[in-house]
Image: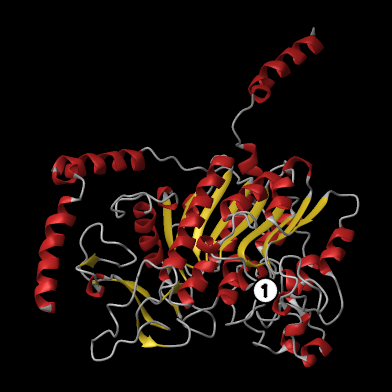
């Protein structure tokens, strides 16, 4: 009987799903016309050799190419379309390349080593951040002398404003790569450090956040690493796991405010306070919305925590007041955490949210002077396969006759805490609901946590010098290319000529006439 149901189900989908595709796609002229339009756009593309006044780096943590494809389909399906034809904001970027993500010591990387590569321009070892490969994981004594600085610091030293926005804790590996030097990415606060590391002079990442680089905008989670042990959290005062953790009794938030004396510095921890921050009257902003990582987008309380779109916008509006420009790192960090839990639905919704933040950033900036890059630090074991019909739910649920037909589920993890597959049979296939946000996707090899992938990741760019981000490059190349485009860091030999070739202003175009007039007055 089950075999008959599957047969009827297949015939049903053949009739319904295929006919659900846009009818114009059956006409060859639809595809020919689309191709010609794309060709005209490519042929009309002009190189933008301007110096980038601003650089925006959008980092999807764990957002491999499979994740981008699946998120594209989800974004369309959330808009009641079949999904495959959807155009993400990042899809519109004209220049695309690949980055090789291996570390000095491992084939497959973590977020700390990769952050060191694309932010500091140096490949390093697994689990260390802001130090070269001469430093050893967890060995404090190996850190001294092996610290490397990031493009965020290079931009600040050049007089630009700088900011970090993340959906994780601000002490997490990706944001930490922009300001910290640590032989352990897990030394979020001093309570996370072994006594030997403290004796040898190493400093926790939270303390480095307020001392290493003068960061104008800091937005994310991570309150508990900033306050003394036992300090009640303002949002969860009765939860001991949310309380402050610092053993040194320092209140880093208060210290940060005192360090900004003479400037307008705001610290906020909820959306009401965040919304009240006036970008035009704010020099510095620290916004920490959770004790640890921020909530997943689909679980976020919009009355308490802003979206990544809102945090990105606030950061840009504050940073762009600087006439010299800015550097901004925006991390969609919980894409990675959704994958680790084999919760593909959560990961994909996070990727869609990041793409929406990219769209908002483009609305707020000028492509002629702002270099915008979207990339990932690494991928995951997520695969997208099978022979699903057009428009099949990317999250996999195909309810017919009361069945969840998992053979039509197209997303699967190579490993992780998903449903075990035994003898090619999946247990309890009638009991799952793949559209449930808490659904744990199937995994071929059961593990406590799903793992990273090691294949190259996409690098998408638009704006000044965006053509530098083409081809297959080492991930460490990205920091140097961003620095070259924005004339920060060591390689600035080209900058004077680039600035002198800037478009004429009305005064500039009148300059020869004025000089001629002055000369005539002097002579006669």
Disc tally is: 1
Q: Who's the residue at 57% across and 51% down the image?
A: 309
For the question of whether residue 322 can be seen, the reply is no
Image position of 486 (left or right of 273)? left
Locate the N terminus and report the quarter of the image it occupies. bottom left
Locate the C terminus and report the quarter of the image it occupies. top right
- Where residue 489 appears, as percent x and y from the top left, is 68, 59
- Where residue 116 appears, as percent x and y from the top left, is 61, 72
In the current view of this chain or complex, which residue is farthest to the front?
402
Quadrant of residue 156 within the rendered picture: bottom right
- Where residue 253 appears, as percent x and y from the top left, is 82, 65
Q: Mark 1 points at which residue?
A: 130
Q: What element carries label 1?
A: loop
As drawn, 15 above or below 378: above
As drawn, 296 above or below 501: below
Image position of 450 (left or right of 125)? left
Quadrant of residue 401 within the rendered picture: bottom left
Q: Residues within 10 Å of mark 1 (few under 14, many from 20)?
A: many
Q: Which of 218 and 506 is in front in this view?
A: 218
For the question of whether residue 230 can be seen, the reply is yes
As drawn, 130 above or below 364: below
Image position of 382 (left or right of 185)? left
Q: Which of 409 and 47 is in front in this view?
A: 409
- Where residue 474 appears, as percent x and y from the top left, is 49, 69
Q: Who's the residue at 20% across and 61% down the image?
A: 389
Q: Nearer the viewer, residue 188 or 6?
A: 6
Q: Who's the residue at 75% across and 68% down the image?
A: 209
């Amino acid at each position: 009987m089950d075999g008959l149901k599957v047969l009827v189900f297949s015939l049903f989908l053949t009739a319904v799903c295929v006919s659900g595709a846009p009818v114009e796609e059956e006409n060859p002229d639809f595809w020919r016309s689309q191709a010609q339009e794309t060709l005209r756009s490519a042929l009309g593309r002009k190189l933008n050799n301007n110096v980038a006044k601003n650089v925006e780096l959008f980092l999807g943590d764990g957002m491999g190419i499979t994740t981008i494809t699946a998120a594209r389909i989800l974004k369309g399906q959330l808009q009641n379309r079949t999904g495959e034809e959807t155009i993400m904001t990042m899809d519109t970027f004209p220049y695309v390349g690949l980055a090789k993500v291996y570390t000095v010591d491992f084939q497959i990387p973590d977020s700390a080593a990769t952050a060191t590569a694309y932010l500091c321009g140096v490949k390093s070892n697994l689990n260390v951040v802001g130090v070269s490969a001469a430093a050893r994981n967890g060995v404090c004594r190996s850190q001294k002398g092996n610290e490397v600085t990031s493009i965020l610091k290079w931009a600040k030293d050049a007089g630009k404003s700088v900011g970090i926005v993340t959906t994780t804790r601000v002490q997490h590996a990706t944001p930490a790569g922009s300001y910290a030097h640590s032989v352990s990415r897990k030394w979020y606060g001093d309570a996370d450090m072994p006594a030997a590391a403290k004796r040898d002079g190493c400093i926790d990442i939270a303390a480095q956040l307020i001392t290493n680089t003068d960061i104008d905008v800091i937005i994310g989670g991570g309150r508990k690493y900033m306050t003394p042990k036992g300090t009640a959290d303002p949002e969860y005062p009765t939860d001991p796991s949310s309380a402050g953790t610092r053993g040194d009794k320092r209140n880093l938030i208060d210290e940060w405010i005192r360090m900004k004396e003479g400037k307008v510095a705001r610290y906020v921890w909820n959306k009401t306070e965040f919304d009240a921050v006036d970008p035009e009257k704010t020099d510095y902003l620290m916004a920490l919305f959770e004790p640890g990582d921020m909530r997943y987008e689909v679980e976020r309380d919009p009355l308490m925590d802003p979206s990544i779109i809102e945090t990105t916008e606030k950061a840009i509006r504050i940073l762009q007041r600087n006439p010299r420009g800015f550097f901004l790192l925006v991390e969609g960090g919980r894409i990675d955490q959704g994958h680790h839990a084999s919760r593909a639905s959560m990961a994909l919704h996070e990727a869609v949210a990041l793409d929406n933040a990219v769209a908002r950033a483009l609305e707020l900036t000028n492509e002629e002077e702002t270099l915008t890059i979207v990339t990932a630090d690494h991928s995951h074991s997520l695969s997208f396969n099978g022979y699903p019909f057009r428009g099949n739910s990317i999250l996999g649920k195909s309810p017919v006759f009361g069945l969840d037909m998992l053979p039509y589920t197209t997303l699967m993890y190579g490993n992780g805490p998903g449903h075990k597959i035994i003898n090619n049979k999946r247990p309890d296939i009638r009991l799952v609901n793949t559209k449930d946000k808490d659904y744990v996707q199937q995994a071929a090899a059961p593990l406590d946590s799903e793992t990273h992938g090691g294949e190259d990741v996409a690098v998408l760019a638009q704006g000044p010098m965006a053509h530098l981000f083409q081809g297959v490059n080492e991930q460490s190349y990205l920091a140097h290319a961003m620095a070259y485009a924005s004339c920060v860091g060591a390689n600035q030999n080209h900058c004077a000529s680039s600035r002198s070739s800037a478009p004429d202003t009305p005064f500039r175009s009148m300059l020869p006439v004025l000089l001629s007039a002055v000369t005539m007055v002097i002579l006669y």
